Image (cartoon, helix red, strand yellow):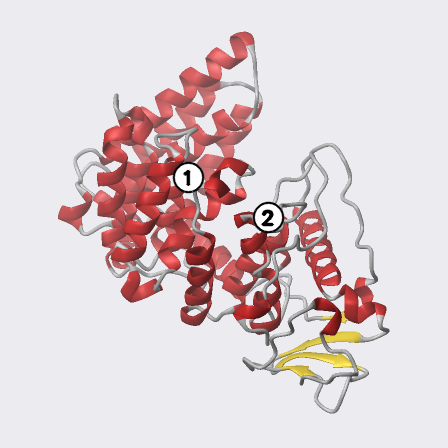
Amino acid sequence: MLSRKRLRPRPVGTPVAPAGETERPATVEPAKIHIPLRESSPDASDCKSLRLAGRYLARQEDWETLAEQLREADTGRAATCGGMPIARLLAEGACSDVVETALAAISANDATTARQTLYCLHDAVDGLAESAWLSYAVARAHLTVAEAWEAVPASGDALTLRRDARSQQLETAARLIAPFHPLEFDSPAIAALRCALLELDPRPSRRVIDEYEDLIDLDPACPAHMRALGRDLMPTRFGNWDRLELEARRTAGRTADIWGAGGYVWVWFDALASGQLRGFAHVDAELFTEGLHDILTRRPDQHTANLLAAFCGMSLSGASEPSSARARISGCFGWIVEDHLREIHPALWASARPFAGTTDASDRLRLGESRARSALAEHFAHQLRLGREVRFTEAGVTLSPAPCAASALAPSAALAYPRRELRDEDTPCLT
């Protein structure tokens, strides 16, 4: 294990080519890195089974049971091991059949069919107007369809059609949840949906902080809410970099009992991963690094380790100034890998940075595995060039043949090599 002193401000991982180009292979052989691959992580399996459960209840038209399960999951703050709210997964599954039909209509620019399909769902759901959670589920379906209208670029008449159809879906979602205040119903799910519909407000920049404060105070253990706050405070949405930095600090203070400084990381997370480099001029790299340590101390699971490793080693990879905030944060890849990473979850690596074209699920998994192994090969390049193999085990990272009597990179503050060329050399032996 490497202490924080070991971190060096240098780019980590293999740079990813811009859209339209192929990604370059690692400069060293990743086959000598032995690390377990988990194609379906526990979090992904939980998400799939919960969506299927929601879809089953909808197909049985058992709306009463669905509403009760949504209420229990929402008020109980139930989440998967990766932090995804279970109420959202059940709602997505319950409306998945209708949403899939609507998405097919969207691909054909058929706004009428997409709208009628969703209104058929309104007619099918018993007690929709009286149930906060059934209204939430149907409103989320409208939001998903609205996002689909926005996702495909268009121009001319097609662009106008898509904008109008998207606005109609957002307004319908807002009407469905308008009677139900999240604080009155103790509902983070409804609060999150209100935040997602902020753009309908004439002055969203004035409401964004209050709405997200309510949401995060209702469910401070959910990283997704803090990440959404950071995205909505970017200059391209309802804020600016200074406001984002201020709210990241305020959120870290309000959630310190759960995350330590981790709240600061979650608010900045997607903003830094977006590729807008100006954010690095405003982020506090040292506080961000402290937050990474606090998150992994409190959530030492492999989902979190892969998420943060992919963020530092893939989302932030590439050339950067040695003393920059970007280099400091991306340099955390080393200790995250050696202290915490024990297996690869390729889906998280595939999502860590945009890629050209569309791929099916199997292609995405292969891309994610390739990205992870390339980043690890770059990090361990010095050891691999010495002819050693790197093995990830539950006990830590080991090198073979051993550089000296003890070759495991075990948790130890003494493993703080001042210069890269002295790490794990046969002489002197610092392990």
How far, Cα to Cα, is label 2 from label 1? 17 Å
Residue 209 spot, x, y in % from top left: 26, 39
Q: Residue at 51% x, 30% y: name it.
A: 103
Q: What residue would you read off at disc 2?
A: 316
Is there any visible trace of residue 66 in the rendered image? no
- Left or right? Give the position of 25 relative to 245: right
**Amino acid at dot 2:** Leu
Q: Is mark 2 on a helix, strand or loop?
A: loop
Q: Residue at 76% x, 88% y: name it.
A: 404
Q: In this view, does 171 lie above or below 290?
A: above
Dot 2 alpha-carbon crowd within 10 angstroms: few under 14, some 14 to 19, many 20 or more: many
**Amino acid at dot 1:** Arg
Quarter of the picture containing the C terminus is: bottom right
Q: Is mark 1 on a helix, strand or loop?
A: helix
Residue 122 spot, x, y in % from top left: 31, 32
Mark 2 in CB contact with mark 1 (< 8 angstroms): no
Q: What residue would you read off at disc 1?
A: 231
Badge nearest the viewer, 2 or 1: 2
